[in-house]
Amino acid sequence: MDKSIAGMPTLTIKVVLLGESAVGKSSIVLRFVSNDFAQSKEPTIGAAFLTKRIYRNDEAIKFEIWDTAGQERFAPLAPMYYRNAQAALVVFDITNEQSFHKAQNWVEQLHERVGNHIIIALVGNKTDLLGMQNLNMGVKKEMIEDFCQRENLSYFETSAKTGENIHEVFQAIGEKTPHPTQKARRNSDHDLTITDDQRIDLESTTVEGARETGGCSC
């Protein structure tokens, strides 16, 4: 590793992805972490955990990403994953209005249980499908804009399939996340909210039955 990179202060950000099943949460994470896309993916069971480090100016930003399952039966587990998170990406399928209403419920739950202590970005995924769909079937822009203004949310339209705006979402999270003190940075090249003995590598381990596979492709 380049010595100049190795000596950089590191900001670690815990990010959780929430949203209905099949909106493409896992595909967003896969695109961001590996710059890859899988047309077909198994549904996430419980949650999957991945990390990605990016470099900006004289700082490294390490994202600790919890990709939660969208199936209703796993919803009660969500607070365990967004607890102490610095940021949440609430994802919906931009061609599916029902998934948008579910995203609204997630935002309301975050505000109710976490308050203003978390950065929330609303993500309308699957923009690549808009040209193939009757636009009247998609989520109305006015509906999205009104909700974002009311809830004070950042909003991004993405495509995990093409990569559109995927990195921009995480970069914006990095810019909005408050920085710890210089002392905290020096003392923590690891997670600020997950200690070493709590770390889990889902390439070889499962969490709540989790496996590193995601919801439907998007």
Image: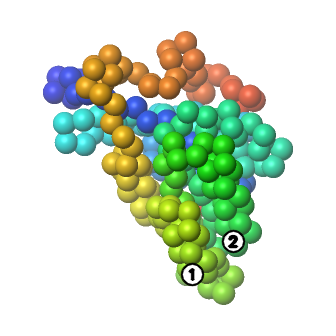
Vertical comparison of 201 with 80: above or below: above
Q: Position of residue 165 (x, y in %)?
A: 42, 61
User: Number of callouts in the render?
Assistant: 2
Vertical comparison of 142 with 83: above or below: below
**Residue at 71 percent of width and 44 percent of height:** 69
Q: Residues within 10 Å of mark 1 (few under 14, many from 20)?
A: few
Q: Which residue is mark 1?
A: 142
Upstream in sequence: badge 2 or badge 1: 2
- Dot 1 falls on a residue whose secondary structure is helix
Tag on residue 89?
A: none
Instruction: Answer whether residue 75 is visible to the viewer in this image.
Output: yes
**Residue at 53 percent of width and 75 percent of height:** 145
- How many angstroms separate mark 2 from mark 1 (CA)? 15 Å
Instruction: Answer whether residue 159 is visible to the viewer in this image.
Output: no
198 sits to left or right of 178: right
Q: Amino acid at mark 2?
A: Asn
Q: Which residue is mark 2?
A: 96
Asked whether 29 or 76 is in front, the reply is 76
Q: Position of residue 37 (x, y in %)?
A: 53, 53
Quadrant location of the N terminus in the rendered image: top left
Of tags 2 and 1, the one toward the viewer is: 1
Q: Residues within 10 Å of mark 2 (few under 14, many from 20)?
A: some
Asked whether 137 or 172 is in front, the reply is 172
